[in-house]
Image (spheres, rainbow, N blue to C red):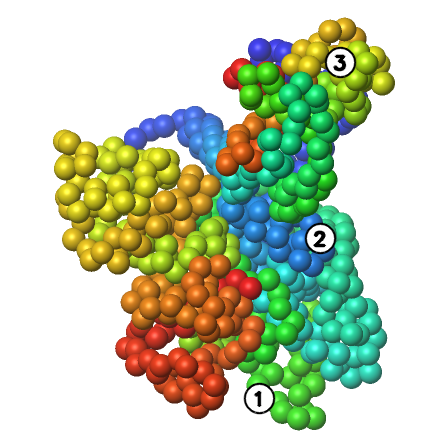
Amino acid sequence: MEEFEPARPAAADASSRRGFFQAGILGLGAAIAAALGLPALAYLLTPPKSRQPDAWIEIGDLDKLATGAPLEVAFRRIRTDAWKVVIEKDTAWVVKRADGGVTAFGPQCTHLGCAYHWDDGRQQFLCPCHSSLFRIDGSVISGPAPRPLDRYETKVENGRLMLGRLRTSIERQA
Amino acid sequence: MKRQVESLVAWLEDRTGLPGAVAHFLDEKIPASGGWHQVFGSVAMFLFLTQAFTGILLAFNYAPTPGEAYNSLRYILTEVTGGRLIRGLHHWGASMMIVIVVLHMAQVFVFGAYKKPRETTWLLGVVLLLLTLTYGLTGYLLPWDNRAYWGTVVATKIAASAPLAGPYMTRLLGAAKGVGVVTFARFYAVHVLLLPPATLLLILAHVYLVRRHGVTPQPGDEALPRKPFYPAQVFKDTAAIFIAFAILFTLAVAAKVPLEQLADPTDTTYIPRPEWYFLFLFQTLKFFEGPLEIVGSTILPGLAVLALLAVPFVDRGQMVKVTRRTVAIGFVVLAGIGWGGLTAAAVLSTPREAVAQVDYSAPTDWIQLSPEEMAGIAYFRGENCVGCHSAGASMGPDLTRTAVHKDAAWMIRHFKQPAAVRPGSAMPPVALGDAQLNSLAAFLLKLTPENSSALADAPDFAVRGAVVYQTGHCAACHMVNGVGMKVGPPLNGLAKRQTRSWVDDHFANPQKLSPASIMPPYQFSAEDKKNLMAYLFSLPE
């Protein structure tokens, strides 16, 4: 029977078989690498979806705050750290503004994270580490601090002050 | 471009010799009879590497201590992108690995490829099989759920019953005072620190021996020219690897890997079952009772391993064609039938779950809802609200986001006459009673983007049980998740306090079991009672 088969050079036949095998090895290998690699990248690089809504923490009576006099308040917050729920102490500098509203600043200097304090004499927030100075509205007067003080989200319910997430000035604008 | 590649290869060859080594490896000549039956070893090696890869990924989000282990695995499954897939690949990869390693061994056995001079290749293979089983045994504990804990309790008790070595085995496994933190640490260390490098070294030695002796020829091969390993055989290996991987990937996507509740050492009702590939051992154990138990637990398995090791030293005859190796084929068939029979018997004797179980591998936001809100999910599903109000559907608004802006009274008016409250609404009126509409509104008020998984994930038994709870007015006396009255005891944590049969009897005649109770007797249909009990027993503490 063999003599009736269409004449094809044996070398070309072998080389096309070889080409098919090589393409198959590469193609199947690439498919497996993609099916493993892409989920792995998503697994490592995309942020996990949080199942915890941001909780509001009750700080206290708004009436007890004096207008224009920053007060450092301490509170406990429940924070979800991946699979761990931690209860930790946190603080905020709370200022009752002249318009009746409230601003609550995060307790760390925006330069390198030192704890700053309110200087009653100068009427400014002063960071002892590198002498950053902030106005009562959180804006930078002088020093190395790169941005205004971070603020908590605030809301008032039945005269009680509630704090939400801490946001930087950049996040607030976004 | 081609020139640059060539010069890079030449540079690498000069500095490292790597391209030459690879070429030498691929250039191996194999017997003319080589082919598809010889792909299993490559598939096994591929699966080992995949297990290492997915295992490392899991370790990136896993805390290896009891309790934390469970929570971090829940985090991987419910919060991390692709976490379910990665865990699915690792779980099913373990099973695939056992299947492929056994197929590899059966092929070598049937073909007589263990004969002189390949005895040591076979011995290393047997050790690799044992390592594979040890991965399965130690990995089983790492999720630290009830299944893991109780399965390991049985495994360590079996090790403790071994003659002479028993007490030492127990101490080695850190299980002298029962399965605990030390056991966990040891199993974890064996699984991720000891086994992987050991496996890698043994695989290297195994492959080295395969290369040293060459792929086993069949009688008749000596008259034929040998053929190159690359590319024909490499293609066959790759195709087989691809098929195995396709099956593995499909399993990981489509088949659920269960996660049960956190391990509870005080649970007296849990019936442990080993992983499917250990079921035959589990069944063997049942044939031996009392002092004979060690025959089934250690002596028979020990003899089986010795028999495997002895194979190349017992069968020392000349190499013959595979079709004439009837005794070997008979052995494999008999072993297959025995294994299959024992496994089938074990599966058939497994009691069917009397009550539905909660799947903790999915989000369980629903567990925090009140019974009234849970019943709302039942009505939401029953009225097919999801047809228009799912996140992707465009007909109605996405209720996870809009519900919070409306109050219950608005919603109930809207349910009754949708177009009257919202002109132009195409929504048909919801034909339910007032109590049911209240329930539906209560659930929708509670719905947020964060807990929206409750809508899809709340198990059917739980929402149906909640409907029974609501129509039976149980909340008039009992509290669940902080909602309801406190005339009777709160029902959270019921599973810890009472057995199912006690609760069953208590429904029929409360005063018989608690004389001071003012609870009336309840006659539920069998279906209602099953759902209500399953729901109540799934409540958190």
**On the picture, is A169 further left or further right than A174?**
right
Query: How packed is label 1: few (under 14 Cα within 10 Å), some, or many (20 or more)?
Result: few
Identity of the amino acid at label 3?
Gln
Q: Nearer the viewer, residue B378 or B262?
A: B378
x%, y% of residue B47? Answer: 58, 49
**Residue A85 seen anywhere in this rendered image of the structure:** yes
* CB under 8 Å between discs 1 and 3: no
Q: Is residue B13 visible?
A: no
Residue beneath the point at 57% across and 86% down = B286
Q: Is residue B289 left or right of residue B357?
A: right
Q: Find residue B64 and name its label.
A: 2
Q: Are marks 1 and 2 in contact (CB under 8 Å)?
A: no
| SS assignment at label 1 | loop
Residue B440 or residue B488, whichever sits in front: B488
Residue B82 position, x and y percent, is 51, 41
Residue, disc 1: B287
- Chain letter of the residue carrying label 2: B
Q: Quadrant of residue A125?
A: top right
- Pinpoint the chain carrying mark 3: A
Kindly report the distance in space between the C-alpha atoms of the residues bearing marks 1 and 2: 37 Å
- The disc labelled 1 sits on which kind of residue? Phe
Q: Is residue B350 above or below residue B46?
A: below
Q: Earlier in the sequence, mark 1 or mark 2?
A: 2
Mark 2 is on which residue type? Pro
Q: Which residue is mark 3?
A: A124
